Image (tube, grey):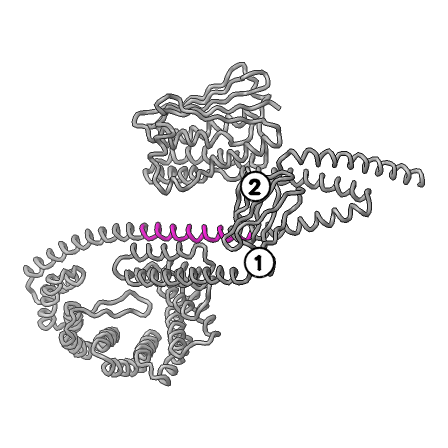
Amino acid sequence: MKKLFAIFLFISLFSFQESTAQNSKEVEEKAAAYFTVRGEIRGEINRTPVEDATVRVVGGEVVKTNAFGRFTIRTRIGDQLVIEHPSFGKEFHTVTSGESIEVLVKGYDEETDNQDRKKSENKRESDLKQHKILLDSAVMFKKKDIDKSIQYIEKALENLYDNRDEKQLSDSYSVLGDIYVYWKQYDLAISNYEIALKMYSTSRLWISLGLTQLLNEQYQEAITSFNRILRNNLSRYQQATVYEGLGDAYNALKKYEKALENYNKGLEIAKEDLITPKITDLNSKIAENYAESGKIQIANNYYNNSLNLASEQNLNRAIVEQDRVADFYNSTNLYDKEIELRKKNLEDLEKSGVQTQTSKGFLKDSVVISSQRINYKIGNAFLQQQKYDEALPYFEKSASEANKKEDLIVQKDATRKLSETLESLGDFDAARKTFEEYVELVNELVLRKEQEISQANRFRKNIQDNQIRIMSLEADRTLENDRKRIYMREQLLIEESNKRQQYTIYSLIFGMTLLVITIYLLYRNSKQQKLANNLLALKSLRTQMNPHFIFNALNSVNNYIALNDERNANRYLSEFSTLMRSVLENSDEDFIPLSKELELLELYVRLEHMRFQDKFDYEINVDEQLKVSEFQIPPMLLQPYIENAIWHGLRYKEEKGKLRISISAKNDETLEICIEDDGIGRKRSMELKTKNQLRQKSKGMGNIKKRIAILNDMYKDKVDVTIADVSKDGQGTKVILTLKKD
């Protein structure tokens, strides 16, 4: 045991002497060699970090400090650093070692810190004012121009891009939800309300979400939202609104007892606080609830209450309620009462001076109340009583007014009823002629409906495009916030790492044995960490196959299906699935056989050629003397270059182009792969790109460069790529990839 200890001590002392000699040699080398050093600048009094200070090596590099007063600079031992800032002028520091630098400066005191804080607060206040102006503009254009309204929301969100004010972000998405509700895009409205609630929850937002879920026929979800908000401190009006919403949801689910319970709770609150509009609405809804559950007499009493309350409220509200009660009379075969009330409804509508009134259904589409519709309903009531002579003039008047006001739906229905009435009166010629008019109106209405559907589809697509832009902006903001958090975490890790290094240095003084072990462990951990990082980066990059090809491939399948080309669709989908399966199988491999990569490339090029047969032909040439089995290649390394050749070179060419892929042996140990196209060239392709495309970096090419860099670091310059124009005028592009055997 003593012998072993003596041997170990001898080795340690020998290692210490060798390490000391090596350290002195390294010091001499460092005196003449550049290295990177980290540092920070702080105020001498309160150690406040100095932001945006200039750090300059005399005759060398210049950098700026970040928000934490930290910097990284390339320097040498003996160099002098010049630190400049408006608050303290200039300070000097001489680099004596490769350890972290801390410079304490005079003049950067609490007053300077307060000035910066005040400047930051002023900027924040200005940003918030600008944000409010943009939201007000969005609300102003809500009913006039949805595109312009959404553009203001987008600008408001951009204004908050670097601001982490969750309340303002929530307000932006809340207003966007209100805009979508007005234009009846309820699913988009719900999505934006949910985003707003995650950022900043308010009672108004929960109520808006619940009401929109009702409109979108998500009744169970609406019940969940309303029950959740009831736990909050709500105003009395909000409580009445929530109970009314719960009643609507249960009524739609035909749970009449639960609906009635919630309507009565809302009505009780409305009566206690004299919320007149709610009292009228809830009486009407309770009446409808009783009517739907078969309790006609009770429903009739509540409808009488709602009529009286509406007449006391205002003329417009009375017109709406008269129409609802008249519909109830019709459903219960009380035609005389219905006719009497509708005549009163017609008189009040004329008295109001407004041509139409809108009655918003509780959970149904809004009903427009107009003179032509009222006349139609009066005529229909007479018709149901077989009073044809009395029904005739009302149908004629309804059809005439609808024709003047271009109300095709009412004109069509009134004309049909008029034809039936004339037939019942025995005037068959007039009935036939009127029926022919009815057929023409039906055809015209069908054409108009088709146009409306087409316009609605375009409108929906435009709105979805706007929403995608906004969601991408939110995704970018989230990523930016994550990046900042990661940066902060890295800074903390750097500080902790520096402290650990100091502790390590101090511990080395107490034992050379610990020094040898520590150096060995640090060296091994560093190598393992670097290897693990490289492997993780490669795995991440390999999985990032360009999504544009996947989406476009699926669109091609969709196109074949739309054209009923089942054979091509099946063939394309089969080959595409084969390609994707192979890509996924190889996703964990750094290298695969060249023969396998060639199969994938040929499959990929064939898929692209199926989509762009009129744009290019291709050929893949492999040197017959080349031993393909002896070479390994990173999977899907060539695909982005081929994709660029097709999408940015050949696709924009007016005549049919040519894509050539050649594989040959440069020597026994090196393989050369050439991808050449006679497309429009890189310069022309850049000119054709939109401004938005120019701002976006190509992830595919970026990933390839990163992969090659990591692979070359791990396998000692195994892969080399050069890109050049084919002709002097910039036409065509040639990519040459050199691959070593080992």
User: Can you see residue 383?
Assistant: no
Which of label 2 and label 1 is nearer to you?
2
597 or 281, which lies in front? 597
Highlighted range, magenta: 462-485
Answer above or below: position of 39 versus 339.
Answer: above
**What secondary structure is marked by label 2?**
strand
Answer with left or right where residue 398 lies relative to residue 540: left
Residue 57 marker:
2
Asked whether residue 675 appears in the rendered view, the answer is: yes
Within 10 angstroms of label 1, few (less than 14), some, or many (20 or more) residues? Answer: some
**Is residue 129 rendered to the left or right of residue 392?**
right
Residue found at x 49% / y 19%: 622
Q: Residues at badges 2 and 1 in contact (C-beta under 8 Å)? A: no
Among all residues in the image, which is located at the extreme top? 625
Residue 719: % across, % down: 55, 27
Q: What residue is disc 1 on?
A: 48
In this rendering, position of residue 405 left or right of residue 627: left
How far apart marks 2 and 1 lie (CA) works out to 23 Å
Identify which residue is drawn at 54% across, 39% down.
Answer: 61
Q: How many marks?
A: 2
By secondary structure, the bulk of the magenta-drawn segment is best described as: helix
Identity of the residue furthest to the bottom in this view: 272
- Residue 123 located left or right of residue 594: left
State yes or no: residue 403 in magenta: no
